[in-house]
């Protein structure tokens, strides 16, 4: 039995919250997506970040959605140090919960209604 290497997909540009949700919905267990590279908590902070307001707000939404997906049992979130004060933020797809027969879109709509 051979070892299967882990391959992490890294976006060529910043991901949006919607693109992250689309990946979560179609990802197979074990798929890995690097959704941000940097220092997330500092990158979304207005005084310290180097991003424009719109980019910073989208990154904050993306980070919140990734945390939400982890809370729902859809992904594991891991960090890999890539340099001093620089990390790769990676979502690893989990098997879809058997009890969650509802589609991801239904979960998102339910969250918005609350």
Image (cartoon, rainbow, N blue to C red):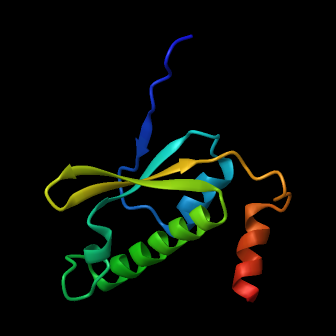
Q: How many marks?
A: 0
Give the answer, above or below, for where 33 lies relative to 5: below
Residue closest to the eye, 91 or 18: 91
Q: Judge left or right: residue 52 versus residue 76.
A: left
Residue closest to the eye, 26 or 72: 72
Q: Judge left or right: residue 64 versus residue 21.
A: left
Residue closest to the eye, 24 or 68: 68
Q: Position of residue 35 (x, y in %)?
A: 42, 57
Q: Quadrant of the C terminus?
A: bottom right
Give the answer, above or below, for where 53 lies relative to 26: below
Which residue shows up at 43% across the image and 40% down it?
8
Which residue shows up at 61% across the image and 67% down it?
71
Q: Position of residue 77 (x, y in %)?
A: 48, 56
Considering every residue shown, the one lying at the far left of the view is 84
Q: Position of residue 61 (x, y in %)?
A: 48, 76
Which residue shows up at 26% across the image and 66% down it?
39
Give the answer, above or below, for where 48 lies relative to 8: below
Which residue shows up at 58% across the image and 54% down it?
75
Q: Judge left or right: residue 56 versus residue 76.
A: left
Q: Quadrant of the N terminus?
A: top right
Q: Quadrant of residue 56?
A: bottom left
Q: Quadrant of residue 52?
A: bottom left
């Amino acid at each position: 039995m051979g070892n299967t290497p882990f391959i992490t997909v890294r976006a060529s540009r910043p991901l949006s919250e919607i693109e992250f949700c689309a990946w979560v919905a179609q990802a197979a267990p074990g798929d890995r997506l690097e959704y941000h590279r940097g220092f997330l908590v500092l990158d979304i902070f207005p005084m310290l970040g180097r991003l424009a307001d719109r980019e910073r707000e989208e990154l904050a939404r993306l980070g919140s959605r990734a945390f939400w997906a982890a809370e729902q049992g859809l992904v594991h979130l891991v960090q890999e140090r890539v340099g001093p004060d620089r990390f790769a933020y990676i979502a690893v797809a989990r098997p879809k919960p058997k009890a969650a027969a509802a589609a991801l879109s239904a979960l998102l709509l339910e969250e918005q209604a609350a």
